[in-house]
Amino acid sequence: MLVLIGRTSWAQRLLLGLGVLAAGVVGLESLSAETVATGAGLLICGLLSLVVLAMPTVRATVVAELAVVSLAFTALCQVLPDGLDNTFGLVETVALVLLTVRSVIDLRPGRSVLVVPLLYLAIVLTPTRCYDLGRPYLEYAVLVLGFGLLLAILLGMYLRLHDQRRIDAAELARQAQRLAYARDLHDFVAHHVTAIVAQTQAVRFTSGAGQRPGPEVFDELLAGIERSGAQALASMRGMISVLRNDEPAPARTTLGEAVAEPVGHFAGPPVTTDLDDDLATTRLAPPVLDAVHHVVQESLTNVLRHAGGATAVGVRVRTRPDARLEVVVTDDGTSTSDTSGSGFGLIGLGERVEVAGGTLTAGPADGGWRVRALLPLTPALPS
């Protein structure tokens, strides 16, 4: 026993001490009764209420049975010639009030509606056990208990609502985290793996056409595949490091860096970048730079995956007269599949742009495909 007590927390010890104290008060109340029957009733009702209150979960049937037992004892006190004179079960009443609050919080609304009225009736009628408590004091006691119990029920409803809001907020946070992980996995993996697939297809196409590449060309193609694989592994290690250490990834500082990184790793047709030098050195807020980076990266990835026969890709970044940043990525290829937004790439890309306060559109344009993002020119905070 001493070992078990030593392992319990201070809160558990406090609750255990309060339970022992309450049980002692129940014993004193039962001893103060004038008859054995009323004393036994006080003892049974008081101890039962403490036992049910100490249960880890609230069970509607058990609480309802306890309320019925309490009401039966109250009715018995009305029948006996000598009921209770100086107490009506203080510990029992407090325990029933606490059980009412727990029932409102823990039970489903359908069961709570059935249990709480029984508890309310049992608590409000407890003062009627005292035969020497006449008017107007009996009426005052009933009114105080009734009004106080209504406040306790409202408290239980508030706590239930608070718990539900906390659960909903946690679920929304988990959902947002899952979406962020899904976007990161797509962005980290799809871009580089798509490059590997495209370069492997180029090797197979060249070999299958009977145009065996020379050693230098073949080595260059394999080197490109090797670079893309190494970049994919590096991206995955970076993401795992962020997830394990809960540290933010290195932030991009300028608009030029956000555009140059995906363009420099692109393994497809030639890319023409239209970005003013002054604009390239502009420092914007991290969400805006992150959105620009992923707009360019996802658009270039879709060129490799969907733009059959593309010979040129254009990336244009400029400021609009309405003081917004416009990022446009175009290609001259023929779409080989539906890229209108049904895939996870454009869906995640749209979410990133919306987080940054912008809008994204994508669709056919001038015989090819165009992705266009409008973003706010939010400056970076001074370091």
Image (cartoon, grey):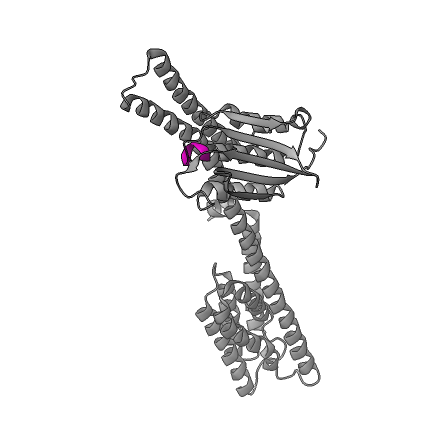
Where is residue 368? Give x, y as percent: 48, 37
Report the magenta stretch's main SS: helix
- Viewer-side residue, 189 vs 13: 189
Residue at 37%, 29% in the rendered image: 197
Horizontal relation, residue 299 to residue 210: left or right: right
Where is residue 194? Give x, y as percent: 41, 31
Q: Residue 192 occupies which quadrant of the picture? A: top left
- As drawn, the residue found furthest toward the right would be 382
- Viewer-side residue, 342 vs 176: 342
Decide: is 286 above or below 57: above
Residue 300 falls within the magenta-colored stretch:
no
Q: Residue 333 occupies which quadrant of the picture? A: top left
- As drawn, the residue found furthest toward the front would be 366
Q: Residue 100 occupies which quadrant of the picture? A: bottom right
Where is residue 177? Give x, y as percent: 51, 43
Number of numbered discs overlaid on the protein picture: 0
Magenta stretch, residue numbers: 302-308
- Viewer-side residue, 37 vs 122: 122
Where is residue 77? Give x, y as percent: 54, 83
Decide: is 155 above or below 199: below
Decide: is 191 above or below 1: above
Quadrant into which the C terminus falls = top right
Residue at 55%, 86% in the rendered image: 78
Horizontal relation, residue 77 to residue 199: left or right: right
- Say if residue 39 shows up in the picture: no
Decide: is 252 above or below 163: above
Residue at 52%, 73% in the rendered image: 113
- Say if residue 48 shows up in the picture: yes
